[in-house]
Image (cartoon, coloured by chain):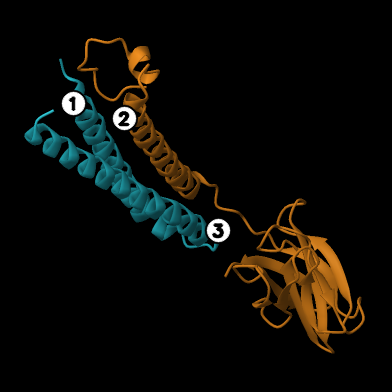
Chain colours: A cyan, B orange
Amino acid sequence: MSNLERSKQRRGLVAINGAITFIIILLIFQIWLLGATLETFLAGHPGAVLPATIFSGLGFLGCLALSVFVTRLDHEPRKP
Amino acid sequence: MSLLPSTSKEPLWREEFSVFASDERHVTRRQFAKFLTLASLGMFVGNLWVLAKAYFARTPSFPSVEVGKVGEIPVRGVKLFTYPTPKDHCILIRSGEDEYVAYSQKCTHLSCAVYFSAKDDRLECPCHQGFFSVRDGSVLQGPPPRRLPQITLERNGARLLALGVKES
């Protein structure tokens, strides 16, 4: 394996780890958001539910995009 | 579950159950990312469920119901009743000579039934030691996140009427 290929693979690895870290951060944010939404709803303040759902949806889209990125990048070294 | 069509010529099962140990870390990372995304979808669906509950929940109606008579219970005594539906258990407390308060009996932590402790002058949840003020139902101690829903009372002659439920 040439130095160029090795360097490319290392960069890919860093990108994948970074993407997974972002996914984890987004997931933690979503878990907190769901708990907070449920709490405010049960406390009789349903006004906060819609914005929270929108932000949760954005979080999911972010996770999905990062997951697609990871899958695509992970496939790359094994292209024929 | 695949987010993208595979770019390699190998069938998917061969990629997922790779022969070489060096390939396994790739699969594990990918599977991990997919699992996290699935969990993220679960959180989003949970939020959608709360949204649906908020928008399609029926607005409860609060009828005017007699819950007791003035002087029926002694000072610092209690009476249990249900309001607004037979499933909603409440507690009426005569906190003074001419003072009556009523609260939902359901603890805001995990829904155990609270009882009135005349000795300590507070409402207590026996499950996790959550204490509520008898004055306004606010949390004095313990894990309950919110105050007890208070039943709005009105005195009509010698009758005590429940008119509604005041949430926190």
- Report the Cα–Cα distance between label 1 and label 2: 10 Å
Q: Visible in this render: residue B156?
A: no
* Quarter that holds the C terminus of chain B: bottom right
Nearer to us: label 3 or label 2: 2
Q: Residues within 10 Å of mark 2 (few under 14, many from 20)?
A: many
- Seen as rendered, the residue at the extreme bottom is B97
**Residue B85: image x %, image y %?**
72, 52
Circles 3 and 2: CB distance less than 8 Å? no
The residue at which mark 3 appears reads as: A42
The residue that appears at 49% across and 55% down in the rendered structure is A35
The residue at which mark 1 appears reads as: A77
Give the letter of the chain under mark 3.
Answer: A
Give the letter of the chain under mark 2.
Answer: B
In the depicted view, which residue is nearer to us: A37 or A67? A67
Q: Quadrant of residue B107?
A: bottom right
SS for tag 2? helix
- Report the Cα–Cα distance between label 3 and label 2: 43 Å
SS for tag 1? helix
Three-letter amino acid code at the position of disc 3: Leu
Q: Quadrant of residue B73?
A: bottom right
SS for tag 3? helix
Three-letter amino acid code at the position of disc 1: Pro
Circles 1 and 2: CB distance less than 8 Å? yes
The residue that appears at 39% across and 42% down in the rendered structure is B40
- Report the Cα–Cα distance between label 3 and label 1: 50 Å
Q: Visible in this render: residue B47?
A: yes
Q: Earlier in the sequence, mark 3 or mark 1?
A: 3
- Seen as rendered, the residue at the extreme left is A4
Three-letter amino acid code at the position of disc 2: His
The residue at which mark 2 appears reads as: B26
Whether residue B43 sits left or right of residue A75 in the image: it is right
**Residue B130: image x %, image y %?**
72, 71
